[in-house]
């Protein structure tokens, strides 16, 4: 739909209609027909409303509306194009808000015969009215159901309920009555029981003085995007990328150098052997690839040794040079190296080495490699039937299954896959198939014992490569099993939220210490005694309990949610839960920065709730120790949380947390929280302007946001990240800011690009970190 709208926009760009030249006059005539001076009113009130967010120019808007009209119109009795009143929402770009558009049409037609057909000339007059008038008058006419110039409390309640449903907000009738009563209490000073237009205007004056900072407005930010020398700018960007990625770069470079060195060593070694006369470079390539396979089969286990990595990252020196946060990505990279090694090693053996051995001249075979085959020249089939070949083929099959089911689409049970395949995919399939590597490593040992072309024990070095990693990984699994049994965890409280989110409050085991931003592995034996799944802790380290928020995103989480959602547990006899951990994560590095920006999309905010809570508790304790005078408590550290969600019900997930945070003048020196709700129409759209006004009034008078029902105010629409980064750059000039993100990959790329751009073009350095999601 968005693509179609954009195409329509571009298709009309070549010519602008001259019909718009009279738009201003038709708007004036519309007002004068109602005995009102439009120019006088427009100078006092808010600017006109926009109905299509991505079109700012009124000429563009009209051309698009006119094109929609022409698509549906028919010739009426007066030989003039006309549309049915039911098509009015589509023509003005309100297909998703039909009820609001119908009420708007009723108000524009003064509620007389509003369902009759609309001619093109009338449609143009109506369009001029609601695009050139101000929001106050439009909303007043929507409220004024009797058309007597007076709006009652019940009228206000009705329009509040209408605009709330239009913006997909949940407002009960009791809340609607409360908000309407608040408006009357604020504006009806003479207690007349109704409001007139001049009184109604004061509602928007109050809200405009208490409006939130424009974090979701469009802005040119010309002072940021200054022209720079292209060559100098490229140098700056390269420098920023080098600073932010040098740890990854040297790690990958070292890995590539080692693989290349091992390949070259074996390649040269077998280049000098007699077998080279039979198989040529195929032999050298196969053996070189085999050596890199030994190394990578050992290395691939290390990034998934969670306890070891968590312990190593505590060392600040190691953590400063080794990218522990990229352990999963490095695990995938090494796995890719294994795939390349298998293709080279197995492919050259099957396609080149075996045919050359079985087909070479007997005289050459006898004087070169006959001794290794007991002086019997094997056929191709005989070579496939050997222990070396069979173990190799079985390993390739098992690895192919494990690698295939570990890719993104099968692991996340993508809906793009055929239904028959979806039934055998998902996280469970990925988890169990990955344990096929137990058999792979066993077969690898057998494969390495029965080697072609060598009987020397010193050359059978596979066990030397994999011994330590296998023992370390096996030891970790045993340690985890023992530790999870030692941790006595009871479910203290369980609650399910809309959006299929499960909240678990768990007892905190003795000697269980963790840092904010860490995660734990959770197991529910009632679902599966083998599966462990990672979830971020949302409780603070200082809390006497542990808490997690689990969203239904897979097989196991669906079963866990259903278990707690459907079950009734007398005396709070909840299902048994085991935990293992804690384990380090990227968010844990927030302690490296004085200024921190946390960005979470939907359930991606979970690791940041622990961080925010931890920071507030520490800051409060520090302030209490220094005294409450406020002097000397000025902290240069600041933490910002930007939480973006599409559904109002998502705020219930962390409602208790946001209510617990006391945003006093002192704590606001340390933390700043911004909620964004994308289901509400952007500022400037008449469908949301009343909700914004009531939100501001309610927050001013009672200190509670009507959307989140917490002291944290909600921004409507998507964040304008350029505005946000520009504000941060001005506020923290010549400082270093850590940007931590948890959410889908698409926004991660945009944010990382902005971090690079603003680090290049401003004196503030933004360092980007992404949490695995």
Image: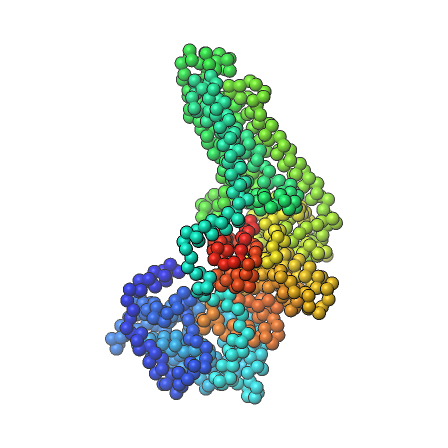
The chosen color scheme is rainbow
> From what the image shows, is residue 267 above or below residue 709?
above
Visible residue check, residue 588: yes
Q: Is residue 162 visible?
A: no
Residue 4, image x, y percentages? 36, 60
Residue occupying image coordinates x 63% and y 53%: 591
Q: Is residue 457 left or right of residue 267?
A: right
Front one among 95 and 559: 95
**Residue 770: x and y, percent?**
54, 51
The answer to whether residue 8 is left or right of residue 657 is: left
Give x and y (percent) for residue 192: 55, 88
Tally the numbered discs.
0
Q: Quadrant of residue 104 in the image?
A: bottom left
Q: Quadrant of residue 468?
A: top right
For residue 248, above or below residue 169: above
Residue at the spot 64% in from the left edge and 67% down from the top edge: 663
Quadrant placement of the N terminus? bottom left
- Location of residue 10 in the rendering, given as x and y in whole percent from the top left corner: 33, 62
As drawn, 304 above or below 612 = above
Please tell me which residue is depicted at 71% across the width and 52% down the height of the picture. Answer: 508
Please give the name of the residue rendered at 28% of the width and 64% of the height, measured from the top-left corner.
14
Between residue 37 and residue 770, name the one nearer to us: 770
Compared with 694, 245 (above or below) is above
């Amino acid at each position: 739909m968005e693509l179609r709208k954009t195409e329509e926009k571009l298709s009309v760009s070549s010519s602008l209609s001259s019909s718009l030249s009279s738009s201003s006059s038709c708007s004036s005539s519309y007002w004068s027909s109602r005995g009102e001076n439009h120019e006088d009113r427009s100078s006092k009130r808010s600017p006109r409303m926009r109905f299509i967010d991505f079109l700012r120019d009124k000429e563009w808007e009209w051309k698009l509306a006119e094109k929609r009209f022409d698509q549906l119109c028919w010739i009426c009795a007066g030989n003039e194009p006309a549309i049915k009143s039911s098509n009015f929402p589509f023509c003005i770009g309100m297909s998703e808000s039909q009820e609001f558009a119908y009420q708007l049409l009723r108000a524009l037609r003064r509620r007389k015969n509003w369902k009759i057909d609309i001619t093109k000339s009338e449609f143009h007059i109506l369009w001029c009215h609601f695009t050139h008038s101000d929001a106050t008058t439009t909303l007043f006419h929507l409220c004024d159901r009797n058309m007597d110039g007076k709006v009652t409390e019940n009228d206000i309640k009705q329009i509040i309920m209408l605009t709330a449903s239009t913006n997909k907000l949940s407002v009960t009738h009791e809340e609607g009555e409360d908000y309407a009563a608040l408006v009357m209490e604020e504006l009806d000073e003479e207690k007349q029981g109704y409001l007139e237009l001049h009184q109604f205007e004061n509602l928007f004056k109050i809200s405009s003085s208490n409006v939130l900072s424009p974090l979701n407005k469009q802005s040119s930010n010309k002072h940021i995007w200054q022209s720079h020398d292209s060559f100098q700018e490229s140098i700056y960007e390269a420098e920023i990328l080098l600073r932010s990625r040098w740890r990854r770069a040297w790690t990958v470079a070292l890995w590539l150098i080692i693989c290349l060195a091992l390949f070259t060593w074996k390649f040269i070694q077998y280049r000098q052997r007699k077998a080279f006369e039979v198989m040529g470079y195929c032999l050298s390539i196969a053996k070189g690839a085999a050596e890199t396979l030994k190394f990578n089969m050992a290395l691939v286990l290390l990034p998934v040794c969670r306890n070891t990595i968590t312990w190593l990252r505590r060392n600040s020196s190691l953590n400063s040079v080794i990218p522990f946060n990229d352990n999963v990505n490095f695990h995938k990279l090494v796995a890719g190296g294994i795939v390349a090694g298998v293709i080279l090693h197995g492919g050259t053996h099957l396609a080149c080495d075996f045919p050359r051995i079985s087909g070479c001249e007997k005289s050459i075979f006898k004087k070169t490699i006959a001794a290794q085959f007991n002086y019997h020249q094997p056929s191709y089939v005989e070579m496939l039937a050997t222990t070396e070949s069979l173990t190799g083929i079985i390993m390739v099959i098992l690895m192919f299954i494990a690698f295939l089911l570990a890719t993104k689409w099968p692991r996340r049970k993508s809906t793009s896959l055929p239904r028959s395949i979806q039934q055998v995919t998902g996280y469970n399939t990925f988890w169990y198939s990955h344990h096929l590597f137990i058999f792979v490593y066993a077969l690898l040992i057998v494969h390495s014992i029965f080697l072609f072309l060598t009987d020397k024990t010193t050359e059978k070095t596979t066990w030397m490569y994999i011994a330590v990693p296998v023992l370390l990984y096996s030891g970790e699994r045993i340690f985890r099993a023992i530790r999870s049994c030692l941790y006595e965890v009871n479910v203290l409280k369980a609650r399910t939220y809309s959006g299929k989110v499960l909240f678990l409050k768990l007892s905190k085991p003795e000697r269980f210490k963790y840092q904010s931003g860490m995660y734990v592995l959770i197991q529910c034996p009632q679902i599966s005694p083998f599966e462990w799944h990672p979830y971020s802790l949302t409780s603070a380290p200082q809390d006497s309990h542990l808490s997690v928020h689990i969203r239904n995103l897979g097989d196991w989480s669906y079963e866990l949610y259903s278990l707690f959602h459907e079950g009734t547990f007398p005396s709070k006899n909840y299902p048994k839960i085991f935990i293992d951990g804690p384990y380090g994560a990227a968010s844990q590095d927030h302690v490296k920065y004085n200024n921190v920006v946390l960005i979470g999309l939907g359930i991606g905010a979970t690791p940041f709730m622990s961080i925010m809570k931890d920071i507030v508790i520490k800051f409060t304790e520090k302030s209490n120790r220094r005294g409450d005078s406020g002097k000397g408590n000025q902290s240069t550290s600041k933490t910002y949380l930007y939480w973006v969600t599409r559904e109002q019900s998502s705020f219930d997930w962390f409602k208790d947390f946001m209510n617990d945070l006391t945003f006093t003048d002192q704590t606001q020196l340390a933390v700043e929280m911004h909620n964004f709700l994308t289901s509400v129409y952007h500022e400037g759209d008449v469908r949301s302007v009343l909700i914004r006004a009531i939100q501001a009034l309610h927050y001013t008078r009672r200190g509670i946001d009507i959307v989140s029902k917490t002291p944290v105010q909600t921004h409507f629409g998507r964040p304008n990240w350029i505005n946000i980064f520009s504000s941060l750059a001005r506020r923290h000039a010549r400082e270093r800011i850590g940007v931590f993100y948890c959410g889908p990959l698409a926004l991660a790329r945009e944010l990382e690009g902005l971090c690079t751009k603003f680090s290049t073009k401003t004196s503030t350095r933004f360092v980007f970190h992404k949490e695995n999601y």
